[in-house]
Image (cartoon, grey):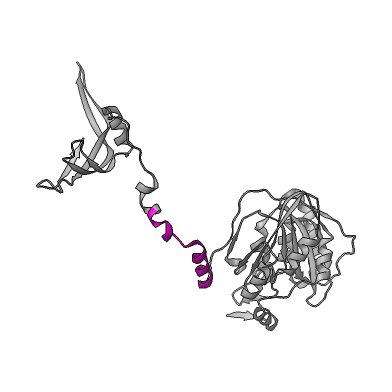
Amino acid sequence: MAIMHPRVAHNYLKDGYYPTDTATLQAIAKRLWLKPGTHRLLDPCCGEGKALTLLASTIAQAPQCQVHTYGVELDTERAIMASLTLDNVLRSNTFDTLIGAGSQSVLFLNPPYGDKVTDQMDNASRSMARLEVQFTQRCLPTLKTEGVLVLVAPYPSLTPAFSRYLAQRLHCVQVFAASTDRFKQVVILGQKSDRRGAQYQEERDCLFEQLVAIGQGAPCPIEAATTMNVSPVNHRPFRFEMVRPDTTQLEQAFQTHQGLWPSLTMQFNPLQRQQVPRPLKRLSPWHLSLSLAAGQIAGKVVSNDGLRTLLVKGGTQKVQRTMTSIDEHQTITTKIDQFQPLIRAIDLTPGEDFGRIVIIQ
């Protein structure tokens, strides 16, 4: 049986759309600096795209920076609005997308909040079944190593299980309260790094205890904002696509690309796709054998005198030749594999031989 809190039900009615306030976005931007190079910023719950647009425009950056923004939004109207300001937008459920691993330099994540659990779960599994936890687990692999995660979430979601998950995957973590306390939000900034080794045990335990304390209601530590230097991404192609388009999206794709029908002849007619040049002079038996072995002799062939027409297909076949020798003490049998050229043809010459199968070898 599925259980859903009334607040979560209301969250679903709005598709989880509660935009990040401007003051919080400005506080995030003050803590980031983009190094020279190409940067990709991803918001998997981008709404109308205003948050990511503001963040991308206010983050301090080096002179030679190229910033590209990517968003995913489930609601059709909001996705259309986001496409006006973001560089690339998918109208899809985030869990129905394919986004290249390690392709993003900044992951901005303000997902839907709430519990969606079943009575078949134990307490540990239930604490990791919150929506914000599931979105984090789904999207964090898209972030490059040393890329920055910006997670906006209510502090009660920092359960021991989720805090341990973050402590094992982030370092240089900063936590501060959001400018609005409507949803008890905190902002977690951290650079992605595998911290599961024994050498990180002390650092990992310290961060784990800090996050758990905040999740239990302790105030965020008052620290001066520290700037995180964000490294650029590489230029390798990556996937940014949906895997379950609806009928409307499929129709738009077919109108844009027209499918395979315009190129049907080219795709299924190899003679038009690749013309085999004719030889300049009569082939010697050696050259003829090579052409047969390569499968280049095929199709309709007319004899030099024009009296016979054949539909031929050239190729090779493997045969085994046996050699036997007898000496004073024993008989030696040797088997040798040989490849022989072979032509199969159908006689298309009008007359009594029409349709006869011809084999030349």
- Position of residue 154 measured from the top left corner of the image (x, y, whole percent): 76, 72
Side of 248 relative to 232 (left or right): left
Q: Quadrant of the C terminus?
A: top left
Between 116 and 232, the one nearer to me in the picture:
232
Any part of residue 126 in sight = no
Residue toward you, 161 or 131: 131
Residue farthest bottom in this picture = 6
Instruction: Please identify the quarter of the rendering in which residue 305 is found.
Output: top left
* Depth order, front residue of 114/233: 233
Question: Which residue is rendered at x = 60% and y = 69% of the image?
Answer: 93
Q: Quadrant of the N terminus?
A: bottom right
Q: Is residue 191 magenta?
A: no
Q: Position of residue 204 (x, y in %)?
A: 77, 56
Residue 3: x and y, percent? 62, 80
Q: Residue at x 35, y 40 (%)?
A: 276
Q: Which secondary structure is most common in the magenta stretch?
A: helix
Taking the image as shown, residue 328 lies to the left or right of residue 247, namely left
The residue shown at (70%, 71%) is 48
